[in-house]
Amino acid sequence: MMKIFSTKYGWFILLAALVLINVLASSLRLRWDLTSEQRYSLSPQTKALLKNIDTTITVDVFLKGDFRSSFRKLRNSTNDLLNEMKEYSGSQLQINYKSVDEMFTDEAKDFMFGEVINELRMNGVNVDSLNQTKPNFREEVIQQMMSDSLKSLGILPYTLEVQEKEEATTQRVIYPSALVKRGNKVVSVDLLSGKTEYSRDPLTGSLVTDEAKSISNAEALLEFKFADAIEKIQRKQKPLIGYLTGNGQPMGPETFDLVQTLDANYLFQLVDPNKTNVIPKDFAAVMIVKPSIGFTDSTKMKIDQYIMQGGKVLWFLDMLHAEKDSLAIVAQTLAYDRGLNLDDLLFKYGVRINRDLLQDQQCDLSKLVVGNAGGQPQLADVPFNYYPLLNATGNHPITKNLEPVLSLFTNTLDTVKAEGISKNILLTSSENAKFVSTPAIISLQELQTIQDVNLYTKRNLPVAVFLEGQFNSFYGNRASAEMRQFFTKEYGSFKTKPDAPTQQLVIGDGDVVLNSFTKQEPFPMGYSRVQERSFANKTFLQNTLEYMTGNAGIVALRNKDVPLRLLNPQKVSDQRLQWQLINIAVPVFLVLLIGFGYMQWRKRTYSIKA
């Protein structure tokens, strides 16, 4: 009886069990992340953020098409992350993969071309002649207009070399970006941004971009980038940032990109502490950028009490007056003290900015006169050691996986003892640096010795420090009864220490967040006009502001690492045949073995016994 039951109903029971397992698998989502770095797991901060999404958010990813392996890996990692995020969002996250051409309809392209044609005709340009002499004139104009539109959204192009044949390569422009959209709000995500890694070419010995490692760094930041974009697009209220004026702070075209950057994610307001009673507590943080006039005790006390009330301050300071413009007139100039009168205040908080100028072999290039021919000055692009490229140091979330930051005429700094204050060095010089102390003479003749490693012997000189804790007031035992009463009236109390920890950023360079400009246009902050590339100044500022005034837990996601596990080329060569046999012969052998075993089982089970 048991044998009849097993043969008659066995297959039915097995089929029913398989159907039940599939139904349970579709309703229950089980996944084990066995990677040491938890590559496929979301952080608790991201999960909480996704579960609180209150309306549909659309993510358009512009990685559609055929790419080489490293970019396919980036696309797959992006896809895995977004699908994981979609699960936790309760399907409030909608994901689309597009090419940038799909953003522009034929009608939009015709409109863009028509606008250009009308403008050219108004300026007296013979458009018919252009159409005849340039067969691809319409396509070129539309491509340029599309590129400008994409850049305005934060979608940046990347030139990818594609090997068409064995020896021929062509260039293809791609846009490794995404747009996060909620209603009429849009936030762009640069999928490729991250620390660029370099390796030496074995033939030439020159440094070349290590694409695999660079993209691995970009992958490590994917969760932070999308979580940060989703958090910003859902904000009900933007933090208010104050920009202190009244002490010679710049307010011209050199602040264009700073204002644009702040305006994108924050409310922004000027405040002159010399003319106001106090710095309002409504400011989530205030910025003090490159002042050139000394601070009075009254203004310093207002800054101090703002900090004691829980306020946060970002200091971008040039202690010495040093500008490149002076070198256009004479071959050397003297860098002198600005007399900002801030040393005592900063010392109390735990930092001292030195009266020196950093010189670094790792620096930007500058156009300088190197000779004269036929009565005309000869310009050349030469390393300018007073424009150091600062390295991110440590594992602080603000600077994790951060590219170098461009600085100009930079002061080094030291930390000093301050009770209850933690100090994290964020930016330093390279391992080949030196400094000149006051009186610092800036001379173009020094550029002739920039390659002499025996002169550049200082390593990792600190330039930027992040201070965190309950600061002690510099005026705790200095303020008169009248001043105490004044701040008690304005703030409700005069404090000698904040009730909760607060933060300050101190950098020995005021130009880090400013931009260069010409009569025609301003450039982004951190942009090298000679190298025609942007450094990480803007990212550094954005990370710092977000950490200090936004969601520090989201910024902490920058600490995630995605190690690149590359195959050993020597072992691949030596063991090629062994692994080919294992991958090809072993599976075939296992199939044959299982088949033989199955046939033997059938013979024993169903053979007719005499």
Image (cartoon, rainbow, N blue to C red):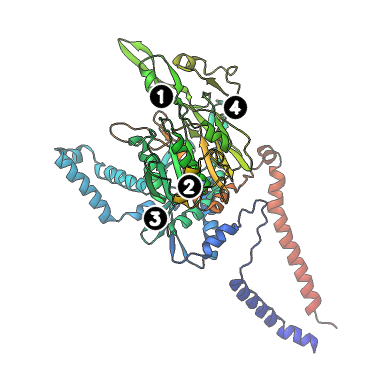
Tell me if residue 211 comes above or below residue 453 in the rendering.
below
Does the residue at mark 4 contact the one at mark 3 (Cβ under 8 Å)? no
Alpha-carbon span between mark 4 and mark 2: 51 Å
Alpha carbon of mark 2 to alpha carbon of mark 3: how far? 47 Å
Q: Looking at the image, is mark 1 or mark 3 earlier in the sequence? A: 3
Q: Quadrant of the C terminus?
A: bottom right
For disc 1, the neighbor class at 10 Å (few under 14, some 14 to 19, many from 20) is few
Residue beneath the point at 47% across and 28% down: 319
Front label number (1 vs 2): 2
Q: Secondary structure at mark 4?
A: loop
Three-letter code for the amino acid on which mark 4 is drawn? Glu
Residue 485 numbered tag? 2
Q: Specify few, some or many for label 3: CA neighbours under 10 Å numbering under 14, 14-19, or 20 or more.
A: some
Identify the residue position indicated by label 1 in the image: 323
Q: Nearer the viewer, mark 4 or mark 1?
A: 1
Distance between mark 1 and mark 3 Cα atoms: 39 Å
Q: Which mark is residue 431?
A: 4
Q: Residue at x 57, y 50 (%)?
A: 556
Report which residue position mark 3 lands on.
186
Q: Are marks 4 and 2 in contact (CB under 8 Å)?
A: no
- Percent coordinates x, y for residue 586 in the rendering: 72, 55
Q: Where 562 falls versus 26 (above or below)?
A: above
- First in residue order: circle 4 vs circle 2: 4
- Is 554 left or right of 296, judged from the image as shown? right
Counting from the top left corner in percent of width and height, residue 42 is at 59, 57
Q: Is residue 71 left or right of residue 105?
A: right
Q: Which mark is residue 480?
A: none
Could you tell me which secondary element the residue under label 2 belongs to?
helix
**How far separated are the C-alphas under marks 1 and 2?**
43 Å
**CA gap, disc 4 to disc 3?**
41 Å
Q: Amino acid at mark 2?
A: Gln
